Structure formats: C-alpha cells, structure tokens
Amino acid sequence: MAACEHLQQATGRDPEPGSRTACEDCARLGLDVWAHLRLCTECGHVGCCDSSPRQHATAHFHDSGHPVIRSFEPGESWSWCYRDERLG
C-alpha cells in the first residue's frame, strides 16, 4: 500500500492553533460539550472529534477540504487523513 501523500505533506507542519483549550466552533455556539480536540495541520483550526456531539473537526474538513488533522490532546501524537482514511 502506498504512503498517504497528505500525511507526508503534513509532517512537520505546526500551524498556530485557533484555540489552545476549546473547540473553536463549540465555543462560538456557547457550548462546552466536546470529548477530544483535533488540530487542522493546514490552518490551525481546533475542532471537536467524532465522539463529540457536533463533530466540528470533520465538518471543518468538509467545509475547507483540508485533509489532515492531528490529535490536540496532551500525550497524543497521531494524525488522520480524511481523504485517504489513513492514520499516521
């Protein structure tokens, strides 16, 4: 299986997070109901994971086309490519 080009391109990207402590979209709605946070490696958008009620990280992918997120949880270092459905 070939390596995912999106994950390779995202390696080393360190965008400034839009938030350091909250899902940006939930915060705009006045909500505090996310499970885990994800960081878009392209623009720094911080959204909530798919275990959260609103799934803002995935919504950001659909709205922006930015394919790679990484965990924004302490101690986690994995990435995910939505386009190729690959873990990195």
Image (cartoon, helix red, strand yellow):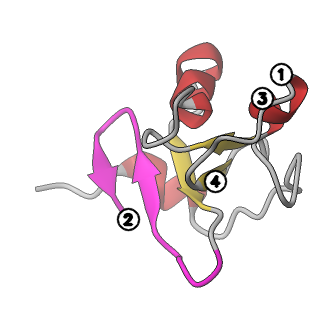
Mark nearest the camera among 2 and 1 is 1
Task: Report the amino acid beneath label 1.
Answer: Leu
Of callouts 4 and 1, which one flags the residue occurring earlier in the amino acid sequence? 1
Q: Residue at x 61, y 42 (%)?
A: 48
Q: Disc 3 and disc 1: Cα gap in Å?
A: 6 Å
Query: What amino acid type should be assigned to the residue bearing mark 2?
Result: Gly
User: Residue beneath label 3, please?
Assistant: 25
Q: Secondary structure at mark 3?
A: helix
Q: Judge by depth and name the residue closer to the eye, 32 or 48.
A: 32
Disc 2 target residue? 88
Q: Magenta region's main secondary structure? A: loop
Q: Reply above or below: 43 against 62.
A: below
Q: Which mark is first along the chain, 4 or 3?
A: 3
- Between 64 and 48, the residue placed more toward the observer is 48
Q: As drawn, is 83 to the left or to the right of 58?
A: left
Residue interval drawn in magenta: 74-88
| Labelled pair 3, 1 in contact (Cβ < 8 Å) | yes
Q: How far, Cα to Cα, is label 2 from label 4?
A: 17 Å
Residue 11 at x, y percent in the picture:
57, 66
Where residue 65 appears, as percent x and y from the top left, is 57, 23
Give the number of the mark in front: 3 or 2. Answer: 3
